[in-house]
Image: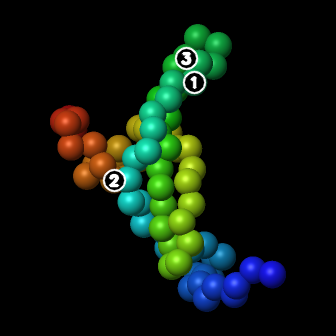
Amino acid sequence: MLPQVEMEIKEDLTLDAHHIQILDRSEKQIRNKIIFMVKILWKSSQIKEITWERESKIKKKYPVLFPNTSMN
């Protein structure tokens, strides 16, 4: 049996998740295009989750995770 965890869920059924850190980077090749991915550790309430996200999307939303990159 799993312990019950209280979570605050919004009306649109989403949770507030906060990034903690980047764990890994990867390149995915799709036909003739390369997509850069990052593995992110998220925390929402008492739950930690790891997901792969597009690096470009995360750079725009959380530039603080990429201190060695300059934004143009």
What is the three-letter code of the residue carrying label 3?
A: Lys
Image location of residue 12, percent across then percent down: 63, 76
Question: Could you say which is closer to the camera, residue 11 or residue 23?
Answer: 23
Residue at 42 percent across and 66 percent down: it is 18
Task: Check the image and name the residue furthest to the front.
Answer: 1
User: Earlier along the polypeptide chain: callout 2 or callout 1?
Assistant: 1
Image location of residue 51, percent across then percent down: 57, 50
Task: Check the image and name the residue furthest to the top.
Answer: 32
Question: Could you say which is closer to the camera, residue 26 or residue 36?
Answer: 26
What is the three-letter code of the residue carrying label 1?
A: Lys
Residue at 44 percent across and 45 percent down: it is 23
The vertical placement of 5 against 30, above or below, is below
User: What is the quadrant of the C terminus in the image?
Assistant: top left
Residue 28, numbered circle = 1
What is the three-letter code of the residue carrying label 2?
A: Tyr
Residue 62, numbered circle = 2
Q: Which residue is mark 3?
A: 33
- Image check: 19 left or right of 3? left
Q: Circle 3 sits in a helix, a strand or a loop, which is it?
A: strand
Residue at 53 percent across and 78 percent down: it is 46
Cα–Cα gap, marks 2 and 1: 21 Å
Cα–Cα gap, marks 2 and 3: 24 Å
Mark 3 Cα within 10 Å, few/some/many (few <14, many 20+)? Answer: few
Image location of residue 44, percent across then percent down: 51, 72
